[in-house]
Image (cartoon, rainbow, N blue to C red):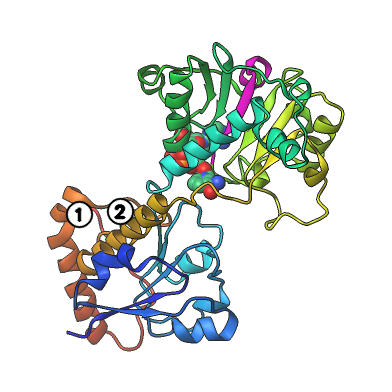
Amino acid sequence: MTPFRVVVADKIAREGLGPLASDARFEIVERPGLKGEELAAAIADADAVLVRSATKITRESLSRATKLKVIGRAGVGVDTIDVDAATERGIAVMNAPAGNTIAAAELAFALLLARVRNVAAADRSMREGKWDRGALGGTELYRKTLGLIGAGRIGSEVARRAKAFEMRVLAYDPYLSEDAARAMGIELAPLEQVLREADAVSLHVPLTDQTRGILNAERLAMLKPGAILVNAARGGLVDETALVEALKSGRIAGAALDVYEQEPLPADHPFRSLSSAVLTPHLGASTEEAQLNVAVEIAEAVRAALLEGDFSGAVNAPLVGGERLQRLRPLLDLATRLGRLASVLVDGAVTEVAMLLR
Ligand code: NAD
């Protein structure tokens, strides 16, 4: 059997590719850093392509990919992949949603602590030769309210850490059940209530049409005077111009940001000159552990997709996997055989398939 050709189009830790690299049924081709025509050529005869965040899979890069079955992203967001173009060509897009969770939650918490205790400002001041204890006093998290927007994998880990600091956790997440929230010690509340009551608000939603600009000027104005905003989710969630205004006017006490509308953050961006903002360059997933976790997670998902037809982790296909897939497999096999038979019985290409359900 010809091995499945898996093109690794970004730098991904070799040990993380173990589930594919250790099996002769896969041929790993490492081609990091390509774009345009070169990328299209590299994946033209691939069965799968793996990316991290540097390489963008555009409609053009898929134009010649006639064998491609799956695009695997070693990370959570799939915004570097043209998912619509992939779907149109019947290519599954899979991500590694769990491997980054702890890394991202710990960074959100580190940002929150750094901001409330002036860690970054104190460090800057020490390096300037000062000993400025008077100007660097902070506030405590103990018994304060943390407002979460989104309490999925990362949000709930942030909540768990907040509980250890004896904070009250309020969350806006319309898809989280009361029972699940209660089990995590989280109170669910409408967005406006979260914004009005929280001492610190931390965003943990994906960037979608519904969440883009979820913290616009009007909503930022609902924050308590003196509140802190943490964003380690995605840049487009917050109206940056409105946030700069809220920080400049001192209406909110500070922001701690890991993600930005435009990345890399432009050198002259106003955030860079605001001392009440703590900034990191999209480091949420940048731990040794997370990089390995996401690589293994996506390598396992791609392996299951190519060997077993298990596309349950695809973000652009209905969820069929595990036991359900096992039960459906004979029917899928039957459908494949009938399709093959039909293709030799009809003249020309099949243009329409109708199913009669009884
Ligand atoms: P998740 O899917 O587990 O959780 C997202 C939560 O948001 C879910 O509970 C969902 O119900 C909720 N949600 C969806 N739409 C909503 C809406 N309109 N309003 C309120 N809640 C809504 O995702 P996760 O693993 O927790 O990741 C959250 C985000 O963190 C990711 O989408 C990614 O953008 C970001 N992230 C950033 C980094 C980084 O490097 N800074 C690393 C990992 C993840």
Q: Under 8 Å from ligand 1: the CB of mark 2?
A: no
- Say if residue 252 shows up in the picture: no
Where does residue 348 sit, x and y in percent of width and height? 35, 88
Magenta-colored stretch includes residue 249: no
Residues rendered magenta in the picture? 193-205
Residue 247 at x, y percent in the picture: 80, 31
Mark seen at residue 312:
2
Of residues 332 and 262, the one drawn nearer to the viewer in this rendering: 262
Q: Position of residue 123 (x, y in %)?
A: 68, 37
Task: Pick whichever of labels 2 and 1 is earlier in the sequence.
Answer: 2
Q: Give the residue displayed 27% in from the left and 64% down from the top.
A: 305
Is mark 2 in CB contact (under 8 Å) with mark 1?
yes
Q: What amino acid is labelled 2 in the image?
A: Ser
The residue lying at 74 percent from left, 21 percent from top is 222
> Where on the picture, by quarter, is residue 164?
top left
Q: Nearer the viewer, residue 47 or 142?
A: 142
The magenta stretch spans residue 200: yes
47 on left or right of 10: left
Q: Which mark is residue 325?
A: 1
Tag 1: amino acid = Leu
